Amino acid sequence: MRSEFLIFGSPKIEEDEINEVVDSLRKCWLGTGPKVAQFENQFKEYVGAKHAVAVHSCTAALHLSMIASDIGPGDEVITTPMTFAATANSIIHTGGIPVFIDVNRDTMTIDVKQIEEKITTRTKAIIPVHFAGRACQMDEIIALANKYKLKIINDAAHAIETDYHGKKVSNYGNLTTYSFYSTKNLATGEGGMVTTDDGELAEKIKIYGLHGMTKDAWKRFSDTGYKHYEIIYPGFKYNMMDMQAALGIHQLEKIERYSICRKEIWDRYNEAFAELPLFLPAAVEPNTRHAFHLYTILLDLSKVKITRDEFMNLLHRENIGTGVHYTALHLHPYYKERFGYKKGDFPNTEFIGERTVSLPISAKLTDQDVEDVIGAVKNILHNNKK
Ligand SMILES: *Cc1c(COP(=O)(O)O)cnc(C)c1O
C-alpha cells in the first residue's frame, strides 16, 4: 500500500505561481488590481470570447449571469440534476425555478430529446452543464433556444479546455461561467469567470459584481486622483483579488501542458480498467475536445458484492482519495421539499448518482500515483466479485 494519502483534486502549484503571489504581497496589491485585468485578458483570449469578468467563484459567476439574463420570480430555467448544487441555487436566488431534465446515461450531459416537452411560457433560459469536461449537444440546444427565445448560460466549471465543433464552449450561447476552485483544471483557490461576446452584459455583470458601483474600485484610489462612485444597481461583493489572479495567470499558461497529462492518465485508466466490473466514461464525441476534468467510473453493482460507498472506503484505506460527482441533486432534502422531486423522477441521473466514483486525474500525479490507483482499484474489485 502507498505510504502517503493521495488527495483527490489537489492542485499543482509551482515556483512561478508562488513568486507571482509574493509579488502581489510585496506591492501591497491585495484586492482587485492589474493582475485581475491581465488574467481576464489572457482568459478571454484563450476561450475566444470578447469579454471576461473575473469573480470570486463560479457560484458568483452563475448568480450574476442569472441577474444579467433578467431571470426573476417565477421564471423557469432548465438544467440537469447531474451537477453541483450551485447551478440550481443560482436560479433559486433570483426567485427563479430550476426545471430539471435527465441526462444521458453514457455522456452524463443533458438529454436534449427531453428538453422541448419541459419548455413553458415561463421558461427563460437553459444552463447546459458540460459535465466532466464533455461538451453538451450545443447544436440541438441552440436550435431550441432560437425557437423559444431562450438564453443559454453555459456552466463550464469543468470545461475550460472543452471544444464543440472546433470552438470553445464560450462561443455558444449568451454567457459562460467557469470555476477556478482548488480541484478544478485551473486553480486559484476560490475563483471564477464569466465570458460573453455581449459588451452590455459584461458591463452589467462587472458592475453587479462590485456593489453596483459605476467605477472600478481599483481605479478609484489610483494616482489619477480620487473619483466619486455612484451606485446604479443593488450589487454584490463578488470581485476577484489580485492574489487569486496571480495564480490564475500562471495556471492558464500551463493549461495545455496539463491537459496532455490528464489525457494520458485518462487513457491509462481506460486501458487498465477495460475488463473490470465497471462502466467507463463514454468515448469522446467526434469533432469535440474533452477537458478530462473528471474521470468518473460507475461501479457495476450487479457484478460486485460492495456498494459504491464501501468501494470508496476501501480505496481510502489504500490511501487513495476519491470524489462523488454527483449524487442526484433533486434528491437532496431542499429540492425534494421545495419542488416535490422524488426518487424515480430522473432515472439516469439516479443510476449514475448511486454508482459513480471520481478517481484522481491531475497533472500533479506521478506515474507511481497512477499505478497505485490502478492497482488498488483492480485489487478491490478482484476481491469483491460476486
Ligand atoms: C465547482 C462547480 C461549480 C461551483 O464552482 P465554485 O467556483 O466552487 O463556486 C458550479 N458548477 C459545477 C458543475 C461545478 O463543478
Image (tube, rainbow, N blue to C red):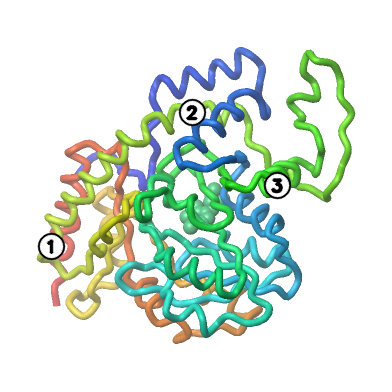
Task: State the residue at coordinates (50%, 61%).
Answer: 84
Between the C-alphas of marks 3 and 2, the distance is: 25 Å
In what element is the residue under mark 1?
Answer: loop
- Tell me if mark 1 has few (under 14), some (14-19) or many (20+) residues whose alpha carbon lies within 10 angstroms of its own: few
Viewer-nearest of labels 1 and 2?
2
Q: Looking at the picture, which amino acid does disc 1 mark? A: Ala
Figure check: 83 above or below 159: below
* N-terminal-most mark, 3 or 2: 3
Give percent across and percent down for residue 124.
65, 70
Q: Considering the image in quadrants, where does the C terminus appear?
A: bottom left
Left/right placement of residue 339 relative to residue 72 reads left
Which residue is under mark 3? 200
Which residue is under mark 2? 249
Which residue is under mark 1? 274
Q: Which mark is residue 232?
A: none
Figure check: 160 above or below 129: above
Q: Do the residues bearing badges 3 and 2 touch, measured as CB atoms within 8 Å?
A: no
Q: Which quadrant of the structure image shows residue 385? A: bottom left
Q: Looking at the picture, which amino acid does disc 3 mark? A: Glu
- Tell me if mark 2 has few (under 14), some (14-19) or many (20+) residues whose alpha carbon lies within 10 angstroms of its own: many
Viewer-nearest of labels 3 and 2?
3
Task: State the residue at coordinates (33%, 57%).
Answer: 358
Figure check: 131 above or below 27: below
Between the C-alphas of marks 1 and 3, the distance is: 49 Å
* N-terminal-most mark, 1 or 2: 2
Q: Looking at the picture, which amino acid does disc 2 mark? A: Ile
The mark tally for this picture is 3
